[in-house]
Amino acid sequence: MKQRMLGRTGIEVSPMGIGAMSFAEFYGPTTEENSFAILAAALDAGVNFIDTSDIYGMGRSENAIGQFLRDNPGAREEFVICTKGGIVNDARGRRFDNSPEYLESALDASLQRMGIESVELYYVHRREEARPIEDVVETLEGFVKKGKIRSYGFSEIAPSSLRQAVVGGPNLAAVQSEYSLATRSPELGLVQACAELHVSLVAFSPVGRSMLTDHPVPQAVAATLSFLGQNPRFQPEAYRANRAISDGFRRLAAEMEVPAAGLAMAWLLHRGEHILPIPGTRSVSHFKELVRGCTLALTPEDMARIETILPIGWAHGDRYSAAQWSGIERFC
């Protein structure tokens, strides 16, 4: 599998990674054994990029990764591991803390859960609005000097914030944002800024939270899940419209004899060498469909056919509800 560079770090990663939020039952029930099977399949396929967070299942995702590493000596050397901190859920509710003390304590706890001494990439999961990003960069550079992280990034920030951060941040390697055929807003500045600054754009939900696969989550099931149950695109009326429009994409994938998920991944990978999709899954068979996208060579004609079926703005409903937008920097 051809490798891509993680920002300016010199670290080579597979063109797709594993979004380990699915290890914490975000999209439905799973088991630690399922998570282990995904990680084992990743090793077999040459997928070495793992993305998790301390907030996923309140440590459950990191614990699963840590147990897999303990059960499989040598696996740590194969994987490039990323995690995140900065979201606090406590008696005061949900808030964001980017203070040096909090981020270091969160990082230390993440390392302990995974049983490792450092991570290759550490993200600020959500920015604390009142704290200058330059101060947060200084904190993260301190973690690099201490050997706890190799590089760092930010999740869901605006291009303007990225440009501020990179000035004093030689080890800033990545920005994470939702990006797919269903969510094209990063193309209004973030894709371009990342390319210009040699920063990786780590794209989560690259298959539209299942809408760009052969088997989208049924609306009745989505209604039972804490996130999708509130998500505007999975409400009954929007869901029906999105399912009907994306059926055309599934027909095209079938005509091309590829899984829809693989075709969605291939489209995204063709948008730029600096883009690293991190789909999540609880199924090894679905994981293999996603990996298929890393080997597809799409022509300009193929890309045009895809975008004729799913043009910019086709999706019905906002990508987040009002509550789900909390902590995310809007820039367009």
Image (spheres, rainbow, N blue to C red):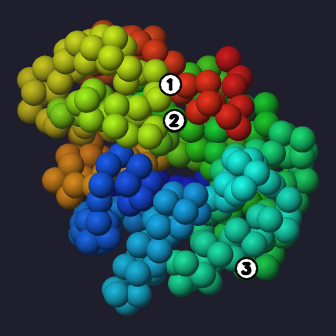
Q: Nearer the viewer, mark 1 or mark 3?
A: 1
Is 287 left or right of 181, judged from the image as shown?
left
Type of the residue with mark 3? Gly
Mark 2 element type: strand
Residue at 43% over, 45% down: 277
Q: For mark 2, what is the residue?
A: 178
Q: Residue furthest front?
A: 91
Give coordinates of residue 207: x percent, y percent.
Answer: 34, 35
Disc 1: CA contacts within 10 A as few (<14), some (14-19) or many (>=20):
some
Quadrant that contains the N terminus: bottom left
Mark 1–mark 3 distance (CA, rounded to whole Å): 37 Å
Q: Nearer the viewer, mark 2 or mark 1?
A: 1
Type of the residue with mark 2? Glu
In this view of the protein, which residue sits in the foreground, 282 or 165?
282
Residue at 91% over, 53% down: 135
Quadrant that contains the C terminus: top right
Check if mark 1's residue and mark 3's residue have beta carbons within 8 Å.
Answer: no
Give coordinates of residue 40: x percent, y percent.
Answer: 27, 71
Mark toward the start of the polypeptide (1 vs 3) = 3
Q: In the drawing, what numbered circle is on residue 319?
A: 1
Residue at 86% over, 59% down: 99
Check if mark 2's residue and mark 1's residue have beta carbons within 8 Å.
Answer: yes
Q: Nearer the viewer, mark 2 or mark 3?
A: 2
Residue at 64% over, 39% down: 156
Give coordinates of residue 97: x percent, y percent.
Answer: 79, 54
Type of the residue with mark 1? Arg
